[in-house]
Image: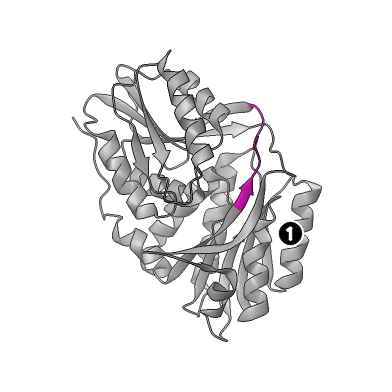
Amino acid sequence: MVEATSLHEFCGTFGTAPVDIVVRSSFEGRSSVLARGLAGSCGVGKSLVFTSRRRSPLAEANLREVRSAVRTAQVVELDRSDALATADAMRSNLGSFFAGLSRSQIIVDVSTFPREELLVLLRLLCDLGPKARTTSLAYVGAKQMGDRLSGEVVQHRSVLGYAGDIHPSRKTKLVLLLGLELARARSIIDNYEPSKVVLGLPRLNDDTSGELRDRLIRFRRELAASRPFGEPDFEFSVRDPVKTCREIVGAVGDAAGWNVVLAPLNTKLSTLGAGLYGLTHDWVQVCYAAVADYQERDYSQPNDKVFKVAMSSLLDAYPTEPGQASS
């Protein structure tokens, strides 16, 4: 279940007891919003703050804001150029963080985790099982996004823990959850050279603007002139991970004899849905397109809306034994 409230209402739901938090500090102003709000409302107990080892001045300024608001912040630097080292650092520090908790109110702010890290985070939280059951995931929305979010794609790779079951002899079906970064989407299509492309369009009534929808439809028309589809488009929720996962299930359809690659390119909440699908269908590869840089100054502006997702709802959708490949 997903709850949407104002920042003030969200922070007020925890009463006067401090909460324990996990935060991903970044160049986005959204990365400090929740930590500052909770620190000024109910207070923050134990806190784990991930940040990039090589960070920009803007990211450093946002980290200072978090540290100023949350005096207990344990800062962990991640080397984004080394995906394996990043995953290892997240695993060891999250394990220690959850092992030492005594409170039941735990917030993981997923607003500004890069998608690759977010997918790793989801797997780690699911692996924690009952320890993570009382955790709430929180996402601060964006009221404005830049026209060009990122630079040139420099590498395509599968996300650690989501490598799938890929056979060179099989054709590839590529499923994309489209968002603003259409150049990134085109790069993924060109790299994987799929036999079939399945495009996911964000549902209009999920805070998706008509302007973005028109851009995506134009992109689809341009793509159709040079690429095979073979599968109908589908709509997906940008705010409810469990719904997103179910919608991907319907879109992938019969996977027998196919390599299936999934590329989430929309909100962090829909990325969680893609990750949940990958965890419950372990033959699917979830991919990530790494970029050279981001348009930091114009990337996003936070709004006053916070989406809260109970980790228990994702754990309930996560089976004991992941799905097996179709034969």
Measuring from the top left, give residue 313's x and y in whole percent.
34, 63
Coloring basis for residues: one colour
Compared to residue 238, the image places residue 199 above or below, namely above
User: x and y percent of residue 230 in the render?
Assistant: 29, 21
Q: Residues within 10 Å of mark 1 (few under 14, many from 20)?
A: many
Q: Position of residue 280 (x, y in %)?
A: 30, 47
- As for residue 47 lying within the magenta part, the answer is no
Q: Which residues are magenta?
A: 143-152
Task: Pick the residue in front: 87 or 281.
Answer: 281
In this view of the protein, which residue sits in the foreground, 230 or 320?
Answer: 230
Between 44 and 177, the one lying in front of the other is 177
- Residue 63 makes an appearance in the image: yes
Q: Secondary structure at mark 1?
A: helix
* Residue type beneath disc 1: Leu
Q: What secondary structure is the stretch in magenta mostly built from? A: loop
Label 1: which residue? 63
- Quarter of the view holding residue 75: bottom right
Left or right of 106 on screen, residue 82: right
> Which residue in the rendered view is the most extreme toward the front?
210
Q: Residue drawn 58% across and 81% down?
A: 18
- 35 in relation to 186, above or below: below
Residue at far top of view: 226
Estimate the x, y position of residue 229 in percent, counting from the top left: 34, 21
